Image (cartoon, grey):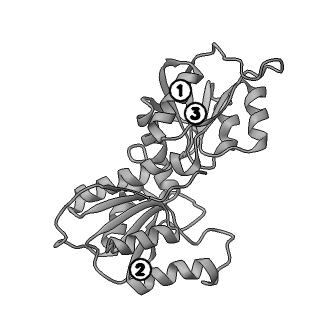
């Protein structure tokens, strides 16, 4: 578990959970997205907000860490109440929410709005970490596109692997656009300059990246089919980890909140190898 304090502002200040949510809703244009879970305030702990903890996923380990930090609210990318999940507050789901309510901790979550935002979004922050410049949308005809296209200095796949490894602290799984049956580890001379980016579980957007003329596509996860799609469409694929690619957005949002309200915000990274 890693901690990153964003600010050490005085804890004498406070705001309501509703005021914090309204600011984030407006900043992220949350109402513009049709999402798989509700965005905004998902659990109201009922007390003023003085200390904020941010993290990728509202798992029990993050809740326990927030309790240890005397946090009044947890802000995450992956919250609760996903479409298709059972509604009753029982089992693991009930245990998580019971802890929040017993401790008076609110929970605020933003999914697609935090992927797509042009400044603090997961795609935008990942592009910045990789010294890439976002130039457009992966789906340009959508009113609020989630995926992005970025450009970079021409570089080999090996060079990009090294940059990703340094930025995220893990080595990505690379599927080369060129498959050689006689030598599966053969190094390609192909240079990458145009990259599709969509963090998390967006591996199936690789076909759209190829349609948009990208040399490579970066996401978090990989499926068995992704390997064949990359080879057959001639596009390099980099699976960099769902969790690892989505740490940037919530940290950046926390910095905005800390600056806006002068409250202490601490990012807590619950390690996840996926």
- Which residue matches tag 3? 196
**Residue 21 versus residue 181: which sits nearer the camera?**
181
Spatial separation of the CA atoms under disc 2 and disc 1: 43 Å
The vertical placement of 30 against 236, above or below, is below
Q: Residues within 10 Å of mark 3 (few under 14, many from 20)?
A: many
Report the side of 56 relative to 215 (left or right). Answer: left
Q: Nearer the viewer, mark 3 or mark 1?
A: 1
Compare marks 3 and 1 and give the one earlier in the sequence. 1
> Which mark is on residue 44?
2
Q: Is residue 133 visible?
A: yes
> In the image, what residue occupies the spot 26% across and 58% down?
258
Marks 2/1 in contact by CB < 8 Å: the verdict is: no
Marks 3/1 in contact by CB < 8 Å: the verdict is: no
**Residue 91 versus residue 120: which sits nearer the camera?**
91
How many numbered badges does the structure rendering display?
Answer: 3
Give residue 7's position: percent from left, percent from top: 24, 57
Q: Secondary structure at mark 1?
A: helix
> In the image, what residue occupies the spot 29% across and 59% down?
257
> In the image, what residue occupies the spot 76% across and 23% down?
184
Q: Secondary structure at mark 3?
A: strand
Give residue 120's position: percent from left, percent from top: 39, 47
Q: Is residue 41 visible?
A: no
- Which residue matches tag 1? 160
Compare marks 2 and 1 and give the one earlier in the sequence. 2
The vertical placement of 252 against 49, above or below, is above
**Residue 98 versus residue 201: which sits nearer the camera?**
98
């Amino acid at each position: 578990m890693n901690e990153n304090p964003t600010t050490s502002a005085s804890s004498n200040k406070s705001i309501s959970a509703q005021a914090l949510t309204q600011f984030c809703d407006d900043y992220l244009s949350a109402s513009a997205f049709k999402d798989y879970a509700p965005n905004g305030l998902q659990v109201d702990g009922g007390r003023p907000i003085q200390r904020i903890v941010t993290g990728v996923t509202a798992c029990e380990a993050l809740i326990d860490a927030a309790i240890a930090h005397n946090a009044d609210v947890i802000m995450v990318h992956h919250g609760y109440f996903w479409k298709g999940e059972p509604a009753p507050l029982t089992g693991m789901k009930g245990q998580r929410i019971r802890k929040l309510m017993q401790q008076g901790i609110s929970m605020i979550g933003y999914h697609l709005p935090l992927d797509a935002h042009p400044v603090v979004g997961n795609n935008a922050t990942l592009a910045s970490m990789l010294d890439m410049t976002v130039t457009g949308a992966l789906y340009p005809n959508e009113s609020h596109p989630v995926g992005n296209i970025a450009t970079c200095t021409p570089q080999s796949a090996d060079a990009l692997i090294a940059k990703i490894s340094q930025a995220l602290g893990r080595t990505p799984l690379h599927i080369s656009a060129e498959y050689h049956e006689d030598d599966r580890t053969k190094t390609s001379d192909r240079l990458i300059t145009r990259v599709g980016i969509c963090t998390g579980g967006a591996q199936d957007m690789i076909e759209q990246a190829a349609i948009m003329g990208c040399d490579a596509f970066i996401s978090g996860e990989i499926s068995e089919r992704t390997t064949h799609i990359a080879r057959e469409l001639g596009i390099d694929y980099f699976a960099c980890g769902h969790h690892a690619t989505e740490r940037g957005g919530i940290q950046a949002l926390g910095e905005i909140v800390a600056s806006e309200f002068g409250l202490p915000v601490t990012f807590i990274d619950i390690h996840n190898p996926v």
